[in-house]
Image (spheres, rainbow, N blue to C red):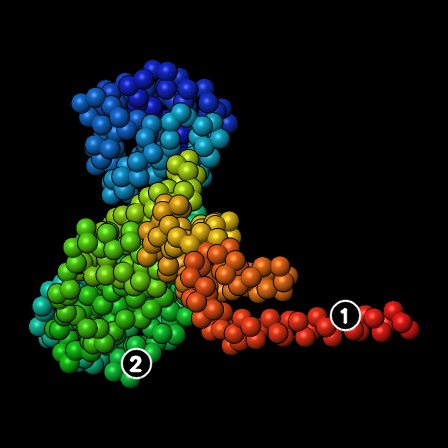
Amino acid sequence: MLVKSKKIRVVVVDDEPLEINLIKKCIDWEFFNMEIVGEAQNAISGMDLVEELYPDILFTDINMPIIDGIKFSEMVIQRRPKTKIVILSGYDDFDYAQKSIKIGVLDFLLKPINNDEVFKTASKLKNIIDYERKSYNEYNLLKKQLSDSLPYIKEKFLIELLSRNFETEKIIDKASFLGLRFKYESAQVAAIEVNSSSMDDDNVNNWTYFIRNIKTMNMIKEFFERDEFIYIFYDTLNRIIILNNNENIDLFEKCEILKTKIIDNTQYFVSIGLGGIKKHMWEIHTSYKEALDALKYRVTVGNNVVILYDHINISNNNNIYNINELNEKMSFYLKSGLYDKAAFLVDQYFQNIDLNSKNTLKDIRVIVMNIIAINFKTLIAMGIYNTDEIYNLQIESFNEILLLDTLPDTIKFLHKILFESIKSINAKQTSQIDDIIIKAKKYIDDNLGDNELSLSLIAKHLYLNPSYLSRMFKKEIGISFVEYLTKIRMEKAIGLLKEGYMKAFEIADSIGISDPNYFSTCFKKYTSLSISEYKKIINNNRLKYNGYVKMKSAN
């Protein structure tokens, strides 16, 4: 019987029977070749079903008595790692998404259950499971091919060379007995990791990893088929290993060419760690260890690289930052619209990461979720998005984070998120500032005759800090508040002088200057003319204009 013909088995665990019924009826499970084979109302009963029914998919509520959904999911993953888990939650707190990442939950749905979202999730899970089942037979065929081309006893010996310190004479003797040829005394080891760049493969299980490795292995063997004294095999963790015993071959240069070939002919990301060249065969295990240490830096430098151990700077970073201080700074920079400072701060978050830890990637993702949570809280606080809009953005970000597996890609993603957010924040603030300036100008126009008119009075009217309003005036208008007020008053005075109906002291009073002498001083400073000089010019111009009009009439 073909594996792919079996129905996909689904178990639902929720302490609310109504929610279980909604899950059962929200979509046509038969359409996806799925069957709900069990249901339970608590984690203990749910665990019994998992042990008994071996479900392919588990839907579980996050908020259940005794054992919550996060702990339950962790238990299931430990006992049945192939089971795909979907968390159901009535809360949109992003902390749940962070915890879900840590334990390996596949999807996260918000209550009340949305039929379209369940349909999308079921479709995605079906594709993953079908791919795994379809790959099973292909994997067995490729495994047989590998077994035929690389006998187990030879592979075991090569692996032992990576982990044990043999005397050179014994290495040569045993290799000769097995039909392996070592000619030179020196040796160098390269370790290769390959990951898919296709989103379709990101959530599938180890079958896909094995198939991808075997295909890459075949390509590497073909690449080196004319080179003697080079051996290609798997280590105990299924990394592809190149053992070079040919002193005439520059393995670093070869790996650079090989990397380009793999990238050009596949959709894979390839990273190669290269140990140092050792003068003695018994040092193979040291070169191997160095190759693995170099490979760890893929998370730091990104995909599609050849990393030579001798070129990396291994040092302990003493720049440890307090996470709460970083969070406060990030919130401030976002609110202030300071993208450059926010982007620089992102790097400091990751200086606390232990790049040699096996949990490095998980630690990076948790930090990313923390920064994104601060970002979204800021956007809500500033009224740019409402909570429903933010929740959808959070889910999109959660899915994108799961696809990131290097620090450069992660930082690039964060820079993009922060840039878009600060762009929105600055646009919002600019709109608010424009509104403030418009209101301040109108208040000045409406109260120009008030000799008590001041920056403090306008700031009080607009419920603003006077210093803030002063800075906004200078920044947006280009001159200080006092200069602007004087300009408006003098322009008003010039208009009234041209009309010729009011005396100087009356004009001064009408524009809010109670002292006529001070008005005269301000006027001369603004126009470079005294009031009498300005009136004379106006009168002369008026006489010339009237004479011109009379001449025109006579003609």
Q: Residue at x 35, y 52 (%)?
A: 456
41 or 176: nearer the viewer: 41
Measured from the top left, where is residue 285 in percent x and y? 15, 68
293 or 373: nearer the viewer: 373
Q: Quadrant of the C terminus?
A: bottom right
Residue 69 visible (yes or no)? yes
Q: Residue at x 13, y 78 (%)?
A: 280
Residue at the farthest bottom position:
248
N-terminal-most mark, 2 or 1: 2
| Quadrant in the picture for residue 159 | bottom left
295 or 92: nearer the viewer: 92
Q: Is residue 368 above or below residue 112?
A: below
Q: Is residue 166 left or right of residue 335?
A: left
The secondary structure type at the circle numbered 2 is: loop
- Number of marks in the image? 2
Amino acid type, label 1: Asn
Residue indicated by mark 2: 250
The secondary structure type at the circle numbered 1 is: helix
| Quadrant in the picture for residue 544 | bottom right
Q: Is residue 29 above or below residue 345?
A: above
Measured from the top left, where is residue 90 in percent x and y? 33, 27
Find the distance from the CA under tag 2 to the CA under tag 1. 99 Å
| Label of residue 546 in the image | 1
Amino acid type, label 2: Asp
Q: Is residue 528 above or below residue 298?
A: below
Residue 48 visible (yes or no)? no
- Other-residue count near label 1 (Cα within 10 Å), few / some / many at <14 / 14–19 / ≥20: few
